[in-house]
Structure formats: C-alpha cells, structure tokens
C-alpha cells in the first residue's frame, strides 16, 4: 500500500484497487466453498449405491449356502446400483473439469439425422415412444459438436421420460437464425420459482417424487447442470419452459453458422 502510494497513486485509485482486491478474495472464497459443497454432495450420492452393493454382497457371503434363491435378487440389485454409479461417475467427471477445457469438435451435419438416431436408441433402451415432429422435409444442416449435441439430447429425453408418463415429442425446425430442437413432455412440470434452480448441481425439485427404484430412474440432479455446461461450451442456447402439472419443453437453439466464424475450426 505504502509502495503504491510512493509510486504516486491517488487515494481514489488506491481505494478502487482495495475494493477490487476484496471482491477477488470474496470470489475465491465462494468458489472454494462451492467446490467443497460439490465434493461433499458427490461423495454423499456415491455412498448410497456403494452401501447397497456392500450390503447385498455381505448378505450373499453369509447366506448364499442356506438360501441360494437370494442370488438372483442380490445380483439384480448389485447390477442396477453399479449401472447407476457408472452413469453418476461419468457425469461427475465431466462436471469436475471446467467446460472451457473440454475438447469441442465442430463438424457440419444433419440435425434431423442426429435426432432420429438418438430417439431410436432411446426408444430401444427404455421402451418409451418418441414422437418426431419435423417442421420441414429434408435435412437441416448445422455446424456443431455432434457427440455433445447427442449428450444434450439424451439428458433432455431422459428427464422427459422420468417426469412424465405420456409420449415424448422432439420437434426440429429450421429458423432464420439457426435451428431449434425442442424436447417436449406433458408430465409433472416445474414450478416457476424452481425453474432457475434446476440448473444447479445436485438440485432436485422434490427428492421423493422422482426417486424411482428402477435402474437410473432416480437421478441425482446433475443432468441439467451438465446440459447447461454443454450448451455453453458448444455455443447453443438452452431454454426451459414449464408449467406445473402441464409439462415441460426444453429447447436447444443452435445458431446458424456464420461465414465470419472461424472455418479452420471445422474438422
Ligand atoms: P435429475 O437427475 O434429478 O433428473 P436434473 O438436473 O436433470 O436432475 O434435473 C433437476 C430437477 O429438475 C429434477 O430432479 C426434477 O425435479 C426437475 N426436472 C428436470 N426436468 C424435468 C421435466 N422434464 N419435468 C419435470 N421436472 C423436471
């Protein structure tokens, strides 16, 4: 401070620098506690499936000889918890790395083709029908990261499946300023006050209502925060509209590839 004063800095300048310094410290502190919170939540969520796996394994160890019928039920539970844990770990690993460090691979491809393939895989995996609505015939060419767009679609389709009983719809439309892919469901919806919060890691509107016992159905509140990171990293806009008891629409707006963009990034 004294040295800066000697260097001829005015009082206002010094005060301004002091304020920036305090802001910087506050930011560092809040990042630190967010990180701590993240690690605490992640450990807590991972502990549940580990405990289930451990209990079933020790039950088998103790009682398999006397009760061989325990085998099927225990293996089923161990398998489903392991699958859940794998999906959780994959999401956690992605979120642990700042999205600006992700490798983004831009290519030109047909958005309709990606939606059709992802929806078909989804139908096969969950036996839930996905209805496609195409605003126009033919391909809708976009420039984006195909794998990341797929991941984003899977998160949104998965939520539509988990929080609604009825069919899920995906609409693709070409617009003047790009392309829009909207995943719609007519499920339980999200109250307005919760709409912003659902993007926070580990935030779940009602922990009891959506925690289903079946494989992967009980999310841990990472899907939408990952979706937000993917959207940010790939330069698309993610918009969530919802009405409690009516349904939810999650729209991905992919901007048109401008001639001014850096074509050398295209691979
Ligand atoms: P989760 O793994 O719990 O689904 P997400 O981050 O994907 O985590 O979503 C956060 C919360 O937002 C969910 O727990 C749920 O309460 C709410 N939510 C997300 N998508 C929908 C939807 N399509 N309909 C109703 N609620 C939703």
Image (cartoon, rainbow, N blue to C red):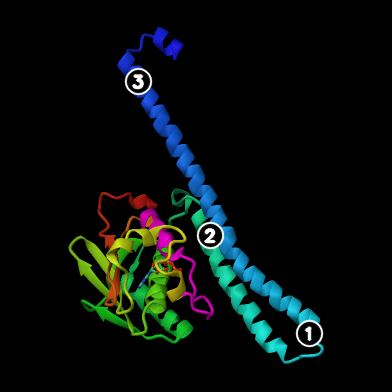
Going from the N terminus, do you reach mark 2 or mark 3 first? 3
- In the rendered image, which quarter contains the C terminus? bottom left
User: Marks 2 and 1: CB-CB under 8 Å?
Assistant: no
For label 3, the crowd category at 10 Å Cα-Cα, with few meaning under 14, some 14 to 19 and many 20 or more, is few
Q: Which segment is the magenta one? A: 211-233
Instruction: Tell me the distance, in whole angstroms, between the alpha carbons under discs 1 and 3.
Output: 72 Å
The reply to whether residue 106 is visible in this rendering is: no
Ligand 1 shows up in which quadrant of the image?
bottom left
Magenta-drawn stretch contains 223: yes
Identify the residue under disc 3.
15
Instruction: Tell me the distance, in whole angstroms, between the alpha carbons under discs 2 and 1.
Output: 35 Å
Residue 58, percent from left and from top: 75, 76
For label 2, the crowd category at 10 Å Cα-Cα, with few meaning under 14, some 14 to 19 and many 20 or more, is some
* Rendered image quadrant of residue 78: bottom right
Question: Which numbered disc, 2 or 3, marks the residue closer to the eye?
Answer: 3
Identify the residue under disc 1.
63
Instruction: Tell me the distance, in whole angstroms, between the alpha carbons under discs 2 and 3.
Output: 41 Å
Going from the N terminus, do you reach mark 2 or mark 1 first? 1
Name the secondary structure under disc 1: helix
Residue at the image point whose x is 33% and y is 63% from the top: 194
User: Marks 1 and 3: CB-CB under 8 Å?
Assistant: no
Of the pair 25 and 224, the residue shown nearer to us? 25
- In the rendered image, which quarter contains the N terminus? top left
* Rendered image quadrant of residue 224: bottom left
Residue 170, percent from left and from top: 31, 77
Identify the residue under disc 2.
92
């Amino acid at each position: 401070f004294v040295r800066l004063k000697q260097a001829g800095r005015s009082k206002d300048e010094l005060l301004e620098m002091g304020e920036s310094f305090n802001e910087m410290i506050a930011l560092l502190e809040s990042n630190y506690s967010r990180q701590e919170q993240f690690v605490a939540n992640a450990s807590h969520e991972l502990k549940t499936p580990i405990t289930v796996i451990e209990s079933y394994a020790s039950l088998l160890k103790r009682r398999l000889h006397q009760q061989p019928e325990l085998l099927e039920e225990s293996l089923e539970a161990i398998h489903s918890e392991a699958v859940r844990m794998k999906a959780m770990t994959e999401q956690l690993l992605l979120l642990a790395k700042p999205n600006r460090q992700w490798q983004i691979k831009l290519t030109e491809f047909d958005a309709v083709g990606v939606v059709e393939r992802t929806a078909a895989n989804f139908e096969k995996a969950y036996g839930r029908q996905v209805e496609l609505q195409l605003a126009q015939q033919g391909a809708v060419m976009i420039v984006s990261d195909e794998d990341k767009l797929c991941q984003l679609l899977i998160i949104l389709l998965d939520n539509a499946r988990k929080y609604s009983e009825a069919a899920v719809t995906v609409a693709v439309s070409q617009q003047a300023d790009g392309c829009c892919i909207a995943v719609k469901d007519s499920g339980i919806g999200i109250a307005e006050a919760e709409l912003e919060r659902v993007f926070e890691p580990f935030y779940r509107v009602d922990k009891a209502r959506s925690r289903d016992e079946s494989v992967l159905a009980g999310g841990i509140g990472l899907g939408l925060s990952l979706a937000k990171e993917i959207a940010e990293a790939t330069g698309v806009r993610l918009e969530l509209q919802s009405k409690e008891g009516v349904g939810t629409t999650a729209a991905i707006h992919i901007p048109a590839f401008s001639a001014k963009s850096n074509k050398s990034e295209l691979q």
